[in-house]
Amino acid sequence: MTEKVNEEKTQHIAGLAKLSIDKEDLPKFTEQLNDMLEMLDEIDTVDTDGVEPTYTVTDRINVMREDVADNWGQRDALLHNAPEAVDGLIRVPTIIDESEDK
Amino acid sequence: MNYFDNDLESVHQQLVNGDITSEELTKQTIDKINSEADDIQAYLSMNDQAIEKAKAIDAAGIDPDNIFSGMPIAIKDNIVTKNMKTTAASKMLENFTSVYDATVVEKLEKAGAVIVGKTNLDEFAMGSSTEKSAFKTTRNPWNLDTVPGGSSGGSAATVSAGEVPVSLGSDTGGSIRQPASFTGVVGLKPTYGRVSRWGLIAFGSSFDQIGPLTNNVKDNAHMLNAIAGHDEHDATSSKKEVPDFTEHIDAGVKGLRIALPKEYLGEGVDPEIKTAIKQAAETYQKLGATVDEVSLPNSKYGVMAYYVLASSEASSNLERFDGVRYGYRADGVKNLEDLYVKTRSTGFGNEVKRRIMLGTFSLSAGSFDRYFKQAAKIRTIILNDFQKVFKDHDLIMGPTTPTTAFKVGTESTDPTEMYTNDTLTIPVNLAGLPGMSLPAGFSKGLPIGMQLIGRPFDESTIYQAGYAFEQNTDFHKEKPQLGGK
């Protein structure tokens, strides 16, 4: 059975990924998500009884190394990419919006 | 005369002999790129230190044992470079410069290659035309009204136009092979684990591989030699020995057992492409190979499984773009949550958002078993199909794409139609196999690509078969006239 999402559900999924869809774009995103779900409708009809899932095709598992710290010494270069940096630290906005307490 | 009408070995010889210096060659390369930039739009940024680097190599002397010494090359802009910006064609990374070089870049720099610029792609490598780039749409040198394919469209177009002899792309569901097919060049996606992904901006980590785009098969083998091998920075890179891929490249195909899956010549594949592939099969038979029809019955489920799995991996990989530590940050935010949401909502393009949302949905409670886990099981049965065929065949052949290059602006807005572009390339990524596209004909003036698929870590057989085909056909010798100009 084809799963369908409405606009509210589409916005909810976007929210889970820390996205917000503009009101005018919401019908289009909802339609496209439903198109994709329609394409995926057949997924249950594939017989996979007793089949193990494959999550990776690498031949390597649990690669270990010595727990040795490697100090790149590149703090300034890294901070250079930060949108806002002060005194060797990354600046972010207030975590809790104080205006909401008033 | 264009130097890059010649193969890498002869350009290298001219550098060694001093017929041309790396500085002259690099200058000519950059001039040609700049003079064609308005038409092709292959590059997102040029390396302003390229001439300096070339001069330094000339001063030190061209290394006669190293084919890339002093050689101009191009890199897809989702592979990080510390001397140039890396944007992934996203507003999110518009002004981002990495503090380190990707392993492949480090290897090529060490070999003396001169990186002339970073090439355009679909944003975060999600797309099949470069139209999803936040900055520009690259054009196909064969016909400027058509797309070069994607996501490695810039890397394919610049090689096709003869601007550089070799470039690097990345391939998650066909992003090297499909543009190679559309632009008439040779593009290889190596076996998963053959090339380090360190410094490749992650999309679908269990699928992504970096690989070469070149004018011919042997140049491609030279490039794989330069970038392959284990890397302690990428735990999924393999410790398997790396052979010299050029060494037995002229071994021929006598006795080679080639499989031609009937599904690859099925519904939706352009009749002229089917004819070209059947003719290629005849060429192989004439050269002493056998070609048998086989079946990959579950490959038709590949698109479904891929879009669930790759989008899920993408939704997780792209969580890091939050406006805090690097990249774009939205203005006028009132708290941290608002910073995340506004940054991501205005920094990502719609295609990236769509895939993040599909992935987030597939992984969410209530959907995980139906979509994500089931897709991973389908991946297993597709893998089993390939293993069965490889029990008594050495190579699989088929078309790379169902159609030739489509017109700019005509890609369907229905994502499910858009994704069928990748029907023939996706199963190879699901199974982690090596696959290469090479020129195999023309339809209405646009190149047709043939895909050769090998056993895991057997790129050598792909190269041998590709080389044999190239030696007996002239398709790779045809060069575009910049859309008839």
Image (cartoon, coloured by chain):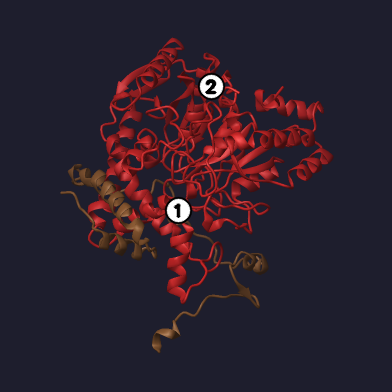
Chain colours: A brown, B red
Res B247 visible: no
Check disc 2 and report the residue beneath it: B467
Res B302 visible: yes
Answer left or right for A10 relative to B464: left
Check disc 1 and report the residue beneath it: B349
Answer left or right for B347 relative to B282: right
Viewer-closest of A21 and B171:
A21
Furthest residue toward bottom: A102
Answer left or right for B63 relative to B86: right
Q: Callout 1, which amino acid?
A: Gly
Specify the quadrant of the image occupied by residue B292.
top left
Q: Are marks 1 and 2 on the same chain?
A: yes
The picture places residue B365, in percent across and down from the top left corner, at 25, 63
Q: Residue at x 34, y 26 (%)?
A: B269
Q: Is residue B100 above or below residue B21?
A: below
Q: Earlier in the sequence, mark 1 or mark 2?
A: 1
Which quadrant: the N terminus of chain B? top right
Q: Is residue B122 above or below residue A20?
A: above
Pointer 1 indicates a residue of which chain? B
Which quadrant: the C terminus of chain B? top right
